[in-house]
Image (cartoon, coloured by chain):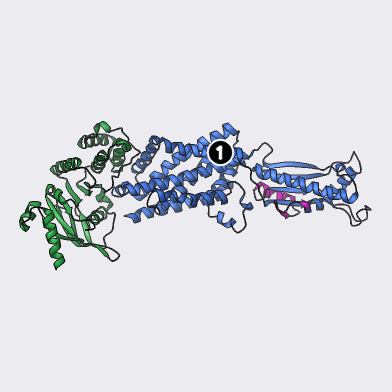
Chain colours: A green, B blue
Amino acid sequence: MLVVETEKLTKKFGDFTALDKLDLSIEAGETYGLLGPNGSGKTTTIKILTGLTKATSGTATILGKRVPSKAIMQKIGYMPQETAVYLDNTVHENLALYSQIFGMGAEETSKRESAMLKFVDLTDWKDSMVTNLSGGMKHRLSLACALIHEPKLLLLDEPTVGVDPELRATFWEYFRKLAKKGITVIITTHYMDEASHCTKVGLLRQGRLIAEGQPEALKKQYGMDSLEDVFLTLARRRDVK
Amino acid sequence: MNARRAFAFTRRTLQQFRHDRRTLGFVLGMPLLMVIIFGYTFGGEVSNIKVISINQDLGLPAGTMPNFPNGLNMGDRMDKSLSTNTLSIERTADVDAAREKVDKAQTWAVIIFPSNFTQNFIQKMAGNVSSPKPVVEIYLDGSNPNIAATFMKSINSAILSAINKLAAEMNQSSRDMPVSIERDYAYGGSGLKFIDYFAPGVISFAIMMVTTMITIILFVFEKRNGTLQRLLVSPATEGEIVFGYAMAFAVIGIIQSVVILSAAILLFGVTIQGNIFLAFFVILLLAFGHQGLGILLSAGAKNELQAIQFIPLILFPSVLLAGLFWPIESITPILQPVSWFIPLKYGIDAERSIMLRGWGIEQVWPQVLALVFFACLTLGLSVLLLKRRR
């Protein structure tokens, strides 16, 4: 089953083309890494999928529904680049807000909240003020907020930027667990080495998909040791053309 | 509109205030400080006080007094000595219509020189003990003690200057020329202090400032911190977000008003003539409108520093032109129409009428309507603004 599908998705900001006829098909259960340097269109793709930005032309569908759509929001978990938690509230109050927004009842809320706190290892910090938490804890809370309503699709915009190596490893551990539960994860990053954690990656450059496939298969196909080399080789080839 | 979702924002915001003691202190402390400081220290000059002067004095016809071959009309003399700087005088003959204008707060006072004024004045001057005293009748709206006091001062000096002039002309001592003033208050009275007049204005002003400032800063934070994006990628509608916040500010506004009113009553013995619930209702309308204004302004600020720059922009027109300290009539005529576009003016007008004059909704509805319009406009535009963001 296709969870995300885009067809000739294009986004222009004035003369600048951020996305150029992008075609994506992402299967259920995939952990899909959208890779590319800054300005390659990763965040724009996520913003169109979340409905935060409108595409100039082309279409995007999530679970068979054209976006933007309010109805589909119930099934999406979104973690923005920023920490996106309320600093002057407690961990519990942050999670309570999102569970209420997603229409969960009191019983379900407390059950899901405990599960999420355990998942991101914040159970002991439930009643702490977010402002007093470390940066890593805030990031974990942000992920918990995105997951509280058991989304089918998780959209993560550069979740590992500015995150220390230990937490980055923890995050990938989380994402693996989510994938096991059948949750489709789309993650953007410019750290090419992280892509080995994904089941599939798409290399994005100047708003176009220049290569796509399983990380190992891609390396083999181009005879390179790392995805970074694959990217650079492809980029050079295009420039020569 | 899903109420549960909307109230989730309300709850979250109120919890934030509960945790953030300093902001809570600001919300409650700033208005308190204002009441106290201004209540004790302020006493500004007022000008252009609207009054009606009615001269019924028949005077003495020509030829009755050797010194005055053309006759004498003391009412006319005093009327002409009234200061045109302080007072803006309208002259009519219809007493009932004039008194009604005071009742409707269209003018501050009526001054009446009765028909026998000059006659009694001359009789009294001549030492006729049985003659009644010459009386200047005054019907005054005392709801603004500052205006009432300035007005009385101006009446006294007008009478005094007319008497002194007459004394000089007659080579007589002005001490033999007594005039009484009979005052009748439409509202307020000699017991009304400046703080009574000031309290409704401070409440309105504090609600306006706190609501606008905190909304701007909260929304700039939401925008910069990514929480707003997260809310927009949820089933919550823009209407629910705005409504949820509005409810939070309604609660904060009510708490603020209770604190300010309690302080005004306990510290300064302020009295409230009208319906307190109507007063609270007007406060809520003010809070809603300015919350919308805050959201709209937050769109123009990239960060908290830029947000703070909006403060003087809202502060100064409101302080100077909304009638907080001095009546709008005292402002330069060119600037007066500007005040029509300051929502705070309607809030202050309504609160003063309710708290000092004891007016009900049947009299303050124009101001209430203006505030409802302002709230609908800014909140409606806020919803559109958030919608445009996606």
Relative horizontal placement of residue B173, taking residue A60 as reference (left or right): right
Query: In front here: A215 or B111?
Result: A215
Residue B179 sits in quarter: top right
| Residues in magenta, as a range | B81-105
Residue B148 sits in quarter: top right
Query: Looking at the image, is A48 positioned above or below residue B185?
Result: below
Residue B45 in view, yes or no: yes
Per the image, label 1 sits on a secondary structure element best described as: helix
Residue at 58 percent of width and 40 percent of height: B38
Queried whether the magenta region covers residue B88, the answer comes back as: yes
Which residue extends farthest bottom? A241
Instruction: Identify the residue under disc 1.
Output: B35
Residue B267 sits in quarter: top right
User: In which quadrant will I find the C terminus of chain B?
Assistant: bottom left
Q: Position of residue B159 (x, y in %)?
A: 79, 47
Relative horizontal placement of residue A92, taking residue B332 as reference (left or right): left
Residue type at numbered disc 1: Val
